[in-house]
Amino acid sequence: MSSMDLCGGRPARPRRASAPTVIKGLDSDDDESQEEAAFEAKASDDESEESDESEEEDEESDHSVAEDEDEAPAKKRPAKKSPAKAPAKKSKKDAEPPAPLTDEEKGTVAKPTEGLAPPMLGAFSGEYAYALGQVCAVKCQATNRWVRGHVIMHHRGGVTSLYSVEKVRVLFEKAQNEHKAHYQDAPVTSEDEADRHLARLDLPTREVRKWTSGTPCMRATDLGHAAASTGGELDKARGFGASKALAVSSEPARYAGRGDAGARLQKAERRAASCLAAKKHGEADVLACLEELGDAWPTQDRPNVTPDGKPVRGMCLGAVFVLGGVGMAVSNVADSHPALTKLVTAWIRASLPESFPFSSIQINYNYMARKHVDGNNIGPSYIRAIGDHAGGQLWTADKFLVEQDENTGETVVKGGGGEAVLDCKNSWQLFNGNAEHYTKPYKGTKAGDAGTRISFIVFSHQAYNKLSTRVATRLRALGFTAASDDGVDLEYFAKYRIDKKEFGADENVKYFRYQRQRAIDLPPPSSSNAVTIECYGLTMARGGGWMAHCDAKGEATVHELTPNMTGFHVLELAVDAKGGPRLVSKHVDRNRFNVYQKTDAETARFCAFVKKLKPNSVVMVCITDTAVAAKRPPPPKLYDAFRDLGAPAHMEKIGYRFPFAFLGVKGGAPGSAVVLMDKTKFLLRIDATLSRTSDGEVTLKGVKTEKTDITTKVILAAPKKTQNVVSHGDE
């Protein structure tokens, strides 16, 4: 398109009536939302910096090698250069007559508007007019110039606006303001408001480049990342995570390590082959093969595990994430020593106390791992230590408990068991790799002997079902039982409530359609002394939630919370004898307790907050992303603070990316508070009435809780026709 085209008017659209009036949220935080997004863009430039968002947790690994390019963009395309001049504004007198939307504008199967119905006649939908990938000119606030770009993100309102899109984020073709400004947020709540900030251009839609975590890239780089979509399909035969370099490799694997380890591993390989030929695969056989290594084991850099920061002796067999743009692969040790790997996996399958699916085995030789949380481990793991030693038990911060789900009656395995020491010598012990754990000291059984301790940690990599077909096939041939390319989770993990995958574009369309209907059917409370908390976590549309409280007259105050912000949003209420609940303090959005980002400092701040509360103060807690980090679990005193608010004595540990809601009273009896938590794709809601006795004691009455499985109720459910949903253009 020429520069003359850019300066012309936007494609003509029919005039639309203004949207219905709805209650506006009372906690609008537009400036903070902009700051949060800027912070996120900065954090994505350097993963060593901590972020307010939780996506980097999935990508950190103890079992990764080569240079870290984990956040490398998935695609790069040749750069296109286009002038970015201000679009000419037509006067109303010279404006072209309204024209219906063309098929091109409505979108096709390959367009980002797929699944969105055209707006009703006379209605305007910012979500539809400025769909993801739409090319447009936007007014850059930093330079006061019109700049060309494309839409990469939608910012939605909350329950009071029926979750309509209020702003769109436009990524510039070129960075502005001396390369400091890369994008601009523009309001689209009405057509007139959108016209003051945006001009839709008649150009092919551009792809929204995303990091491997799923977050849109927000760095402008001459459109090398955002050329017009080609519509090319992925070669399904290669499955998930396929690397071109791996797919074309046909040479037999060779051990890539240094020193004497290679020669020693070959001796172990030959002995393992003899054991397999004799159909022997017991613990003694495995130990005999590993003793061939002597002290010349392969070494690993595991800074979060190493006692002194130096490399440690050990190796990982099976699925690993290889840095440097390679992705998921079979570990070099396993691929180059198939007999040794098959011997170990055969022994493990035969000796485990249950049919436990695993994709990886970490083997450690003679070192005590310091306190840490495993990276890229899906969670449930088995450990066993062999060799001549005494001690060396595993300390864990939170032991698994087996219980019946109160809603479904199904067996679930969850945290909450508290600290425990597991004796893993010659015995398989189940533990949670996502909870803190470390190795207790050990020694030899003979005087002056340091002993030999070889430990095996059997687990599944979080990407076990997103492997390339070649990698999955190779792992299964080596004896690993959790290796696939179909993206489907194994049923075994359902009892652990593991589900970290984020909704895709089509799933989010269904979810927000449900949310709009829900906002009508289940609005904020309107009865005397009522309180409500509703929230959902990161994996559903990047998270969100709100809290509301009514006074004695039933007049509601609704606190709309900024989505995609880690940690706890907290409200403090006092219940007056006549006026009912009133807000005393709020710690939300930028003032929230972000125990995810600054775990120790923010935990201490939250504990100090609870300690200073007056008796009978009401505390409401809500999340809009994830409350805690996967590898930085909060200390026990966080749960002590919740127990001061009436939490149960054995409160389950808060899970990474689990939705979490809490309603309690300072000084309440143990178990009197309402604690809700469930799998990542659950929507949570607490409704209650605050009651105050004559002596000032506050209690919770009429408590109702809701845990809605969005995958079952919304994503997999047959579509329904609704009669009373207000149209915003995407029903």
Image (spheres, rainbow, N blue to C red):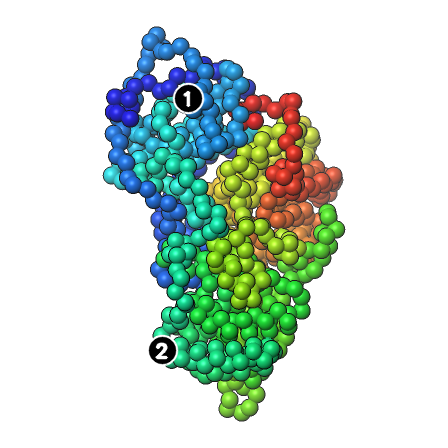
**Residue 259 bears which disc, if any?**
2
Q: Which residue is found at the position 52% from the left and 16% from the top?
A: 121
Is 143 left, or right, of 52 in this rendering? left
Instruction: Name the one closer to the observer, 712 or 667.
Output: 712
Q: Quadrant of residue 663?
A: top right
Tell me the distance, in whole angstroms, between the alpha carbons under discs 2 and 1: 67 Å
* Residue 712 locus on image (x, y percent): 65, 41
682 above or below 482?
above
Q: Quadrant of the C terminus?
A: top right
User: Compared with residue 284, is residue 538 higher up or lower down, i.e. above or below?
Assistant: above
Q: Is residue 360 left or right of residue 46?
A: right
Mark 2 or mark 1: whose residue is earlier in sequence? 1
Q: Nearer the viewer, mark 2 or mark 1?
A: 2
Numbered disc 2: secondary structure:
loop
- Residue visible at 68% across and 55% down in the picture: 412
Q: Which mark is residue 193?
A: 1
Give neighbour class at mark 2: few <14, some 14-19, many 20+ (Cα, 10 Å): few
